[in-house]
Image: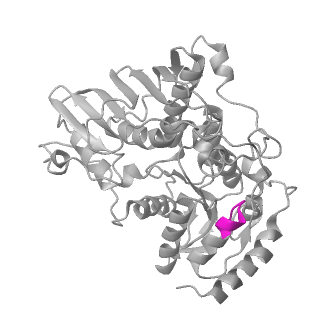
């Protein structure tokens, strides 16, 4: 139990440390390289121990901090800095850490620190690309929450930055290092239902803003301009922040870009389709009848892949085959196999768990260093850094291709037509209007 005196002490520390990093004029220095225990480029020294910092401490950010504090107790990392634009979230993080840690509102102060080897980014989606690219340019490894990006141009910039600066970027789609997805992938790839022709997803609808409220002043302790970052400026509204950014196409992209980033990542893995880059996408949806949020309430998206031929369907709500809130079904020539959620928070179907590898069958990648799949996903990231190959289980290229499915689904809905995607050249064939919408302007100075 934390005493009132300890809470007050942390609050005083937060005010002195956090407010030291509020300037918005700090430039980005692409030439800076970290000089902690990890040697450049990306290969560790003899005593592997990462010095890490957290950028974004709401929601999953606190889970990531708890994971890193456990790694710290095991002697694998040192948590050296915390950053959030909301002083209340910084205070909560400090209370959880139970020790003093330097705090910042502006992430650029963290990137300027040469002692920090890696950052964990859990900011809202519209910040992921800018902060990841800037971190890569300063030589820091990155763990970034899903979805990787809100536009396809941003995702490509993230991949390019990771490769140019020889750092490991892991996207937080934890299904690929969780037991449920592993059992399912192993069974599907080895023919449990024969050749899979179609994969369907079900998911509950996007919410409707039933109680609109007027714009207002931001709450005390929140740097609203910094929270908006790359987005066009707009007044604060409680139906936008906190968490409700998810229900705007410009920032969160709705369920398909949130949970779809998890489900599609696992599906691509099970189908061995990470390199199947080109497809068609056709979406339709029901716009919200009222309120500030603009993501479609219901949504159906169909993706058609060729060579090999198979169909991916996003259903919102879709056909609920399983028992839980969302999941997907692999439909094969010899039956079907259900995977609840994305293979992380729920176990695999018993048929997949009990599946016996046939003679000549192939195993799929697995890491099971930790029972907790969130810990396991970060341990996989550490492994890619330690071994120097810099390609974790959900490498930024995989995260970008997954986000591309989500972003094109939303784009097809916005335009109201079918899109033919050339994944090699990353453009829509014969549709210049769609191609102009693959990226968008970002507000200075929060831009790539």
Residue furthest to the top:
430
Residue shown at 49%/80% (left/top)?
73
Q: Can you say whether 70 is above or below 162 in the image? A: below
Q: Give x and y (percent) for residue 353.
A: 19, 51
In this orientation, which residue lies closer to the viewer: 45 or 330?
330
- Could you tell whether 305 is left or right of 67 in the image? left
- Could you tell whether 339 is left or right of 78 in the image? left
In this orientation, which residue lies closer to the viewer: 346 or 298?
298
Instruction: Write the start and end of the magenta stretch as one range.
Output: 83-90
* Number of numbered discs on residues: 0
Location of residue 412 by image quarter: top right
In this orientation, which residue lies closer to the viewer: 404 or 112?
404
Q: Give x and y (percent) for residue 22.
A: 82, 63
88 part of magenta stretch: yes
Location of residue 59 by image quarter: bottom right
Q: Inspect this view and state whether residue 58 appears.
A: yes
Q: Give x and y (percent) for residue 362.
A: 23, 44
Q: Give x and y (percent) for residue 344.
A: 36, 53
Q: Can you say whether 343 is above or below 13 in the image? A: above
Q: Can you say whether 286 is above or below 41 in the image? A: above
């Amino acid at each position: 139990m934390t005493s009132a005196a300890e809470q007050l002490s942390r609050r005083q520390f937060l005010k002195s440390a956090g407010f030291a990093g509020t300037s918005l004029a700090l430039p980005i220095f692409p030439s800076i390289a970290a000089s902690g225990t990890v040697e450049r480029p990306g290969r560790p020294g003899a005593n592997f121990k990462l010095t890490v910092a957290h950028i974004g401490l709401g929601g999953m950010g606190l889970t990531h901090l708890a994971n890193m504090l456990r790694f710290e107790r095991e002697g694998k990392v040192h948590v050296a800095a915390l950053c959030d634009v909301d002083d209340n979230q910084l205070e909560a993080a400090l209370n959880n850490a139970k020790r003093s840690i330097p705090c910042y509102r502006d992430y650029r102060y963290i990137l300027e620190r040469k002692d920090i080897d890696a950052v964990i980014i859990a900011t809202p989606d519209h910040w992921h690309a800018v902060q990841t690219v800037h971190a890569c340019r300063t030589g820091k490894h990155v763990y970034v929450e899903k979805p990787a990006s809100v536009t396809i141009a941003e995702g490509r910039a993230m991949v390019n930055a990771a490769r140019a600066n020889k750092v490991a970027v892991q996207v937080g789609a934890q299904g690929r290092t969780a037991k449920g997805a592993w059992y399912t992938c192993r069974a599907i790839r080895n023919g449990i239902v024969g050749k899979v022709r179609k994969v369907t997803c079900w998911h509950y609808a996007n919410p409707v803003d039933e109680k609109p409220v007027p714009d207002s002043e931001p709450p005390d302790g929140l740097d609203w301009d910094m929270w908006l970052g790359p987005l066009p400026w707009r007044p604060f509204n409680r139906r936008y922040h906190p968490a409700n950014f998810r229900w705007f196409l410009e920032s969160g992209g709705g369920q398909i870009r949130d949970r779809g980033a998890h489900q599609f990542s696992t599906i691509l893995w099970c189908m061995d389709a990470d390199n199947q880059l080109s497809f068609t996408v056709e979406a339709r949806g029901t716009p919200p009848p009222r309120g500030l949020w603009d993501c479609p309430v219901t949504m159906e998206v169909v993706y058609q892949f060729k060579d090999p031929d198979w169909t991916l369907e996003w259903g919102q709500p879709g056909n609920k085959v399983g028992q839980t809130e969302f999941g997907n079904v692999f439909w094969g020539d010899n039956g079907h196999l259900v995977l609840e959620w994305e293979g992380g928070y729920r176990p695999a179907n018993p048929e997949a768990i009990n599946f016996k590898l046939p003679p000549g069958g192939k195993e799929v990648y697995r890491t099971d260093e930790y029972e907790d799949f969130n810990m396991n996903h970060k341990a996989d990231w550490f492994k890619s850094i330690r071994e120097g190959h810099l390609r974790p289980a959900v490498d930024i290229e995989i995260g970008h291709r997954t986000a591309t499915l989500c972003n094109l689904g939303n784009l097809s809905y916005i335009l109201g037509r079918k899109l033919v995607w050339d994944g090699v050249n990353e453009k829509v064939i014969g549709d210049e209007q769609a191609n102009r919408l693959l990226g968008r302007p970002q507000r200075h100075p929060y831009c790539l």
